[in-house]
Amino acid sequence: MGGKKILEIDGLYPIVTQLVFISCLLAFCGVPVIALVMARARRMESSAVALLLVGLLLGLGVGLRAFRGGGLVLLDFSSSITPFAFTLALDRLGAFFLVLICGVTIPVALFSVTYLDRHYDAPRRAWIWGLFSLFILSMILVVVAATAFAFLVAWELMTLFSAGLILIEGSSKERLHNLFIYLLMMHAGAAAVAASFFLFSPFSPDLGFANIRLASSLLTPGVRAAIFLVAFVGFGTKAGIIPFHLWLPRAHPIAPTPVSALMSGVMLKTAVYGFVRFSFDFLAGGPRWGGYLILFVGALSGVLGVLYAIGEQDLKRLLAYSSVENIGIIFMGLGSALIFTANQAQTWAVLALAAALFHTFNHALFKSLLFLGSGAIADATHSLDLEELGGLLNRMPVSGAAFLVGCASIVGLPLFNGFVSEWVTLQSFLAGSTLAGDYPRMILPLMAGALALIGGLGAACFIRVYGVAFLGRPRSAAAGAAQEAPPAMQWGMWLLATPCVVLGIAPGLMLNPLTVLSQSLIPGATFPEMITSLPVILVWTALAVLVTICLVAIVRVRRRVTPTWACGLPGLTERMQYTSTAFSKPVRFVFSVVYKPDRRLEILPNSDTYFPTAISYSSVRTTSYERYLYRPITDAVIGLANQLRRIQSGNIQVYLLYIFLALILLLTVVGIYR
Amino acid sequence: MSLLLPIFQALLMLAGAPLVGGVVSATKARLQRRRGASVFRSYADLWKLFRKEDLTPPTASPLFALAPLIVFTVIVVSSLLLPVLTEGSLLGGRGDFILLISLLALARFFLVLGGMDGGGAFGGMGGSREVLISALAEVPFMLSLISVSILAQSSRLSGIVHWTLSQNIFDVSAVHILAFSAMAMVAIAETGRMPVDNPTTHLELTMIHEAMVLEYSGPSLAFLEWASALKLNVVLSLLVAVFLPWGMATAWTPPALAIAVLAYAGKILVLAVTLAVVESGVAKMRMYAVPDFLGIATATSILAVVFTALGRR
Amino acid sequence: MEIIQLAIGKALSSSAVFLLISVLLLAAARRVSTGIILFALQSAIITALVMATAYTEKSAEAWIVAALVFGFKVVAIPTALLWLVERLKVPREISSQLTAAQGVFVAVVIIVLSYAAVQSYAPEAGAAADPLAASVALILTGAFLMVSRRKAMMQVLGLLVMENGIFLAALATTFGMPLVIEIGIFFDLLMGILIMGIFAFRIRDTFEHLDVSRLRRLRG
């Protein structure tokens, strides 16, 4: 990609691609116009959705072509005002994320057609479709931007449009508070991202990506380390990595469900994109300790994220925390790639990077799937509280099966895509033993233990979700009366579930191009051979499972439906089932250090000691981050603000005096500086 | 020939699985000064269950009937990964220990879900205990095998066996001892034996595996019982293959193979009797003492991995 | 003869491994009597090491030291301690501040630290890294046992383990100390055990328990 490097595959290709891409962008811009202009018209929705799908398909086509073929410049508005150069270009890395964004959004959009229709009135739908389209446009711009200016503009727009979408859902006080935290942290992160760009500016005045790349070799080690660190903080905030995850479980659940799917499944991935762009493309590896930092923070995010997810009752919050976990796994892969790069083991670095990117893609698939599934559940039962669900698989078999695929994938079970990316990540950890030096040889293989723990706890988490929500008896009347989701929603879910299975059995489809992509990011690497060996056995396993199921289906078993024996009592009721709280209790008990529950038991005594009038029990999980990390910061900021309030008199002349003094001061400084 | 032997090996594992469980219970009976049932009792049980009808709770979903089959198939596939008589196995050249661990996790996933689909209290109870214990066991399971595979420079089980066979049995290696101790503890937890889980109890305070399969009957139960027996066999064979592979056939000659079969049977017998002795000698742990037990295994396996890096063997 | 040489070689190369494992087991031990038996086994390994050294160095003194180690540390002291535990009739558990798993984690950290610490010294001291690291690990584990266990008996045991570590360090670096000093140390130890034993009886008789964490009156 970059600057002037246009890959001449054939003369027409660049021009055609540019035209297609421009029409794709125009389509996205057109959707809000249609939605708002035709807000009253009956055909509004179908035309808006049609245009949106056209845009997505065009984007997908461009992305797939460039993902396989290589880079080109799409648009170039380089003006004479250098810091505001606005160039869009597409290289393999950007193209991969373009494929991810468009590919995942298509099913989500399909799902939304019916979902939005059932849950929102026409004017709000118009707003949602308009903002939805602009949100996607901003994400696409992030991954095709080729100058710092373009990147930062798109980055900010992405935050704003998603915030707008959250606001549509409602504006109660609590929601506004959560939204405020979201915006605040996003802007802090964006400031860090901007700062990391500006650190390049002495060496690359126009801040175009091509020049930044050239400039990185001129940097002093100190500045390189600073850029790496600031970029990690900036993108880590967007990715929701612990301890910058505070906004994630607040913001994701309060958005409309399809938007939650996009935020968790796709928007977080732009942060991964940004971090890969900085650490691998710009800095070509970062400082020596960088890899360890990323690895440890990733492992921490993974373990804590999944533990918090297990503690949640609300399905959407649970999924949001599970995103923290998966982002942790992705960063573990990135950290391992950085360690290998720093130790000149390029081939393994390629493998680890490909694994991280593959997991990024996989997570986009199954997390969006699970969010859509939670939408289907909410649609059918009007509840996302696990305690009020149950027995849904009998009532909504198609959605239930898709959700099962999502659960199995996210847990990383063989035959599903999550397994393959975790397998390759584990292989890269194992390969750490081939490096020189005691630390990488010790730390990398030990990280496999952390990943195993994440996998085991993830299984605990999603077995609980599926078992409580979809199996057994319905725990509420609403769950008992649930109906199967309408066809468009089923299609949306299965369009995401199918690639989960396909990539689980034939991972090479995605893994091979990703390896080529990683190779282009890590100079001097060869193609690792081992990737090709796994798929065969997965096919074998799949075959074995299928054959057995078919065999037994042919051989009829005598089967009788009869009530379960209830130890002599009249019969089992749904209240006798293990609740979701009870199911997670052992894990929460063993890891109580992490949860630090704040329990309150209040008993209103009666004259009779054994029969109190009322007992109330509450258990609130406190997060230590708020108390020990964020509280001091906010206290300091508020304290500072209180001090600053003294200069606020309210008198306009005083303010003019301030401006006057500032001008004088500035002139003095300039004068002395000259 | 190259296909025949692995198939024979797989069938041996599958058919011999109930016998291993039988030997354990027979030994336990003897240790308790009972005559006990025949070692072939498990076969009769399976045969009986296969001829019975299958009872399904009215609220169960199709997953309830499907889960036992998936569990059984997946465990069978995982047994195909193991080198038993020779270095090779049906799938051993292509799959590694990570796949083996993950296949066991896949089986467990459906086992727990099947239990929860029964709609009673016990499925969830057993399931919630099982997922905790397996999550904690996963770490030492992975790390102890990783430490050995680092020594062997191969993550394939056949590669590990090949390397170990080339070593002298008397070369005591810290990594091997530590990894073996961790693996032994993991094996107890994974297969649900005492002191982690009592395979013979039906008391709700203590049961884990039995609670999950409580609502099953007939052929479904038979598949689950067979799968659980095979899993015990798989885990014991894994211990044998990784830590004590000596005696495996390196040539394709009948005498070598005969020795391999005898050696394998002998080693499994020794492990089964040891298991029976351990089970008779210890008391079942409290549920919340299990994390402590597995914590020891984790610490030990961490040390094993660290020792591979320090170059001490 | 060759077979003996081979056996000695193996014993020397693998003794460190077994000592480290005894460290892990000590950290996991839940009963005082288990700890004592582990200490006896540990001393037996050290006896074997001394014997191996005696054979290769052809030193009569070393044979005597081996006999002393065996007599005192493998037989006499453990028997005495076991008898003491039996007679004191206090609960068998060591009542630690930490769970068994946490104890083993600490032991793992101790072992890794000892290797890290010894790595640079070992060549200078002209000793193999393994036994030296094991000796450091033994000393640290002894200290750890004394710090974390509440029973007075375990303080004695921790002291003994530390002494084992010091003995091993001497053995690893200079093939053992002169005989006179060894004998002196042994008598020191024996006296120490004797005094501790008497104190244990007195403590038990006065306070009806042996829990050192509850002995706080002294601070006045």
Image (cartoon, coloured by chain):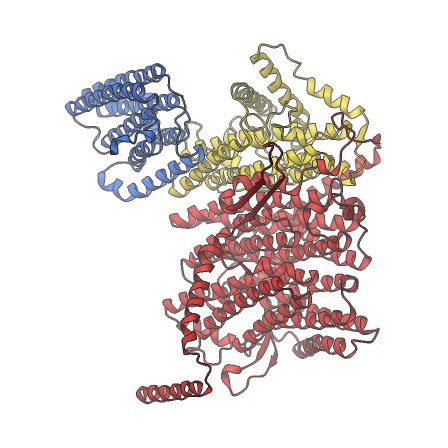
Chain colours: A red, B yellow, C blue
> What is the x, y in percent for residue A349?
50, 56
The quadrant in which the N terminus of chain A is found is bottom right
Q: Is residue B310 above or below residue A483?
A: above
Quarter of the image where one finds residue A616: top right
Residue in the image at 63% along x and 31% along y: B208
The quadrant in which the C terminus of chain A is found is bottom left
Quarter of the image where one finds residue A480: top right
> What is the x, y in percent for residue A138?
63, 72
**In the visual, does A282 lie left or right of A556?**
left
Total marks drawn? Answer: 0
> What is the x, y in percent for residue A375?
72, 56
Q: Nearer the viewer, residue B215 or B264?
A: B215
**In the visual, does C6 lie left or right of B51?**
left
Residue farthest toward the left in the current orientation of the protein: C180
Q: Nearer the viewer, residue A284 or A333?
A: A333
Q: Is residue A646 above or below residue A332?
A: below
Quarter of the image where one finds residue A11: bottom right
Residue A445 visible, this orientation: yes
Residue farthest toward the front in the current orientation of the protein: A607
Residue A540 visible, this orientation: no
